[in-house]
Amino acid sequence: MDTVKKIIDAHAHIVQYIAGFTSRGELRGIGGGLARYADGQTFAMIPPEYGDYGFSPEQLINIMDENGVEKAVLLQGQFFGFQNEYTAYAVKKYPERFVGAASYDPFCVRAEDVRRHLFKELGFRAVKFEVSNGSGLMAYHKPVDLDGEMMNEQYRYAADNGLTFVIDIGRPRNCCWQTEALSRAIKKYPQINFVICHLLAPQSGDEQLFERELSRFALGNVSFDLASLPQNQKGDVYPYPETVKYLQIAKRIVGAEKLMFGTDAPSNLCRDRYAHLSDYIEKSGVFTPDELKKVFYDNAERIYFGKQV
């Protein structure tokens, strides 16, 4: 990337070992970067040149350095399996490169003890919930009301402890994609910075739906990462002309100051090069140079690293 000098990847993962739990049951690494669900389905989860069973912080840093990326936000979910201790280790070892978000299952009987360890002892300043019915909370629990008491307890905890709240609500037309309930809940907590993953994960042909539902989140305390936006457009290939339509809509409705570049590495590196996952945004022509600076760096620096830019 020639015109953007500073980059933060606002949605990346490290993996000590693949230990997921999803709608297909347990998900375990079987070597060579492959993983297998409990129902027997096997697929590529990590490019084999980056790891057989995991993806280390050093591997991520190497890829970041190759692509001129200064920092990354380490998120988690049930797909790879929670990586709280490993993420805390990486942030402590490389504080100039990483910030992390903790994840937990609020249905745990001793959830309060879990939260104490994550946020008081390990020191996480952000929390990430994946609630999707594919590989999130609703994959192995009954549907959860995103404005119900269970989730409001988690919002209140984030508000009381000054946490950034990151949420992945899965894909449209599923029980987890509760845009109305989530927007209603967000309005109750104006003191929380909310980040919605994958720009609401619109699928190919969802332009009208996306425009309508994104408008619910044109709020001062809501931002979005762009991770996996191209991968959600089945059949779209680099430089992702179908994906660019959603960038145009998002800029118009919420503005460039609410959008953050992210790759969802390492799994998306099984599908395309890291460079392509970033420079398609610049090549799209959607954003001015000043707006690109916000999308690639300033917004994530402000929200996750706590610095005004």
Image: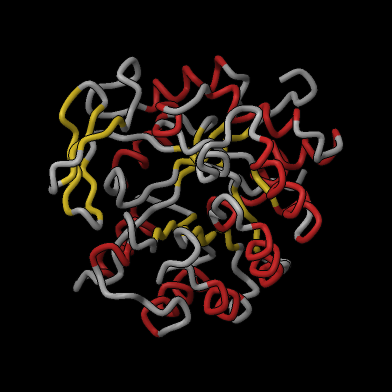
- 131 vs 71, left or right, is left
Rendered location of residue 129, percent (x, y): 41, 60
**Residue 300 picture quarter:** top right
Compared to 145, does 213 lie above or below? above
| Quarter of the view holding residue 216 | bottom right
**At 30% from the left edge and 30% from the top edge, which residue is drawn?**
44
For the rendered model, the colour scheme is secondary structure
Give the position of the N terminus as an image quadrant: top right
Q: Is residue 148 above or below residue 250?
A: below
Residue 264 screen position, x and y as percent: 47, 38
Judge whether 239 appears above or below 288 on screen.
Answer: above
Give the left or right position of residue 181, taking residue 5 as reference: left
Quarter of the figure with residue 253? bottom right
Nearer the observer, 80 or 232: 232
Say which residue appears at 34% left-offset and 56% top-offset. Answer: 118
**Residue ID at (31%, 47%):** 79
Give the percent coordinates (x, y) of residue 266.
Answer: 41, 31
Image quadrant containing the C terminus: top right
Residue 75 percent across, percent down from the top left? 44, 46
Horizontal side of residue 79 vs 39, given as left or right: right
Please tell me which residue lies in front, 169 or 203: 203
